[in-house]
């Protein structure tokens, strides 16, 4: 069994020697436990702040522990009456090839795979990021038909679901993404009304032109310059679900970063806004997963993914994702 473990807490961008691939013998399951083999590993931006020694909304990863992460995995040994050998699950395995855990461990879900839905989609648009986009938009953003919704990191799994869900609710949807190719995909494939390339050098003017009626919902994924450009366009009554601000995740001093909260509270009136966690809707896990998987199966919910091959490629893929080198959901394929 191989695992990628945290050897040194990164200062800024991850450097050689911070995350290290090691052999770690897999532990045989005891009574009540299962051993799973990881097939697909999900790479998600939240993993970077968890490498810091700061208590955020989750505990930091301990030195020498595998990096946290969700995967699609197959049960290869079972001493639990809850799982049989061959069951496919999503679970928080961490960055490793095998892992053993109790059959009643939290956040382990049997996958009810629908026809035409690839397994790895249960880590992307039909998985945690998809539920984040769906629930954050519907329950914090509260979209109404005819409103203008702006979403940043628009081509990623969260943004993809936010935009297409908002379209289904009858909204005008404007994405923000890095580069012409991503913007073209967001409009032509995902069906957004417009997409602004924040790297093109005219962010404020392009966003203003794309939002002639102002902005009613800004779904925040990135922070920084995009938030500053959005802020003056927010209409009275606007809502801002704060999902994340990936532009700051490599900051050497998080405390010095200008957060979306800092920007929003300077506005008059201050728009309705709050940070949310997808786990707030854990009771809707099955229901929302089924909605999203059905939309994937029917072809209604479109998405892209970027696949890195083998656990050894995870670190570079992760570093790239924080800089936008991924196009759609970033995955690591570990095994068939
Ligand atoms: P993505 O696949 O969209 O990857 C991150 C993207 O962020 C990159 O591809 C890049 O896209 C964009 N980005 C990176 N740096 C910058 C920058 N400086 N300015 C603007 N954009 C930048 O990630 P996800 O869809 O998985 O996640 C999106 C957000 O949702 C993240 O902030 C994440 O932390 C958050 N999240 C929050 C959850 C919650 O429970 N609150 C749960 C899951 C995710 P581009 O090339 O377009 O710049």
Image (cartoon, helix red, strand yellow):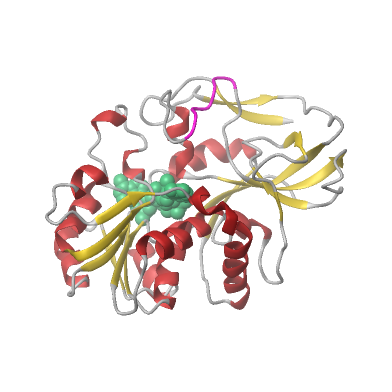
Image location of residue 143, percent across then percent down = 36, 70
Q: Which residue is at a point 49% across and 37% down the rendered structure image?
A: 47
Where residue 298 sits: x, y (%)?
A: 61, 78
* Magenta highlight range: 58-64
Q: Is residue 13 above or below residue 243?
A: above
Is residue 264 left or right of 76 when viewed as pictured?
left
Question: Is residue 250 toward the left or the right of residue 319 in the image?
Answer: left
Q: How many marks?
A: 0
Find residue 3 and report its image quarter: top right
Examine the residues drawn in magenta and state their main secondary structure. Answer: loop
For the point 48% across and 20% down, which residue is it?
8
Was residue 35 drawn as part of the magenta stretch in this picture?
no
* Residue for point 70% across, 39% down: 105
- In this rendering, the answer to whether 194 lies above or below 81 is below
Q: Is residue 61 above or below residue 34?
A: above
Where residue 164 appears, as percent x and y from the top left, is 44, 71
Quarter of the figure with the N terminus: top right
Left or right: residue 265 compared with residue 8? left
Residue depicted at x 53% and y 45%: 43
Residue found at the very far front of the displayed protein: 283
For the question of whether residue 96 can be seen, the reply is yes
Viewer-proximal residue, 232 or 177? 232
Residue 325 visible in the snapshot: no
Residue 60 shown in magenta: yes
Q: Quadrant of residue 77?
A: top right
Q: Tell me residue 291's x, y (percent).
A: 58, 69
């Amino acid at each position: 069994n191989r695992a990628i473990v945290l050897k040194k807490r990164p200062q800024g961008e991850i450097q050689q020697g911070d995350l290290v691939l090691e052999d770690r013998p897999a532990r045989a399951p005891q009574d009540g436990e299962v051993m799973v083999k990881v097939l697909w590993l999900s790479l998600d931006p939240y993993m970077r702040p968890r490498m810091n020694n700061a208590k955020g909304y989750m505990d930091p990863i301990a030195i020498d522990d595998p990096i946290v992460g969700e995967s699609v995995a197959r049960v290869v040994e079972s001493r639990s009456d809850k799982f049989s050998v061959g069951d496919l699950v999503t679970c928080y395995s961490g960055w490793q090839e095998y892992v053993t855990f109790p059959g009643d461990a939290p956040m382990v879900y049997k996958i009810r795979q629908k026809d035409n839905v690839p397994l790895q989609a249960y880590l992307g648009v039909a998985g945690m990021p998809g539920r984040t986009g769906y629930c954050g938009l519907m329950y914090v953003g509260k979209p109404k038909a005819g409103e203008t919704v702006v979403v940043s990191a628009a081509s990623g799994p969260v943004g993809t679901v936010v935009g297409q869900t908002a379209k289904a609710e009858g909204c005008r949807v404007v994405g923000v993404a890095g580069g012409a190719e991503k913007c073209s995909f967001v409009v032509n494939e995902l069906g957004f009304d417009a997409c602004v390339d924040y790297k093109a050098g005219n962010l404020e003017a392009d966003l203003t032109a794309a939002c002639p009626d102002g902005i009613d919902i800004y779904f925040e994924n990135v922070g920084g310059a995009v938030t500053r450009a959005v802020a003056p366009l927010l209409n009275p009554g606007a809502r801002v679900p704060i999902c994340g601000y990936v532009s700051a995740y490599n900051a050497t001093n998080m405390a010095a970063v200008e957060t979306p909260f800092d920007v929003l509270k300077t506005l008059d009136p201050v728009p309705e806004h709050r940070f949310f966690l997808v786990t707030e809707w854990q009771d809707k896990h099955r229901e929302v997963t089924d909605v999203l998987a059905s939309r994937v199966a029917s072809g209604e919910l479109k998405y892209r993914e970027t696949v890195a091959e083998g656990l050894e490629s995870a670190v570079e893929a992760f570093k790239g994702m924080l800089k936008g080198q991924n196009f759609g959901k970033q995955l690591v394929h570990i095994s068939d």
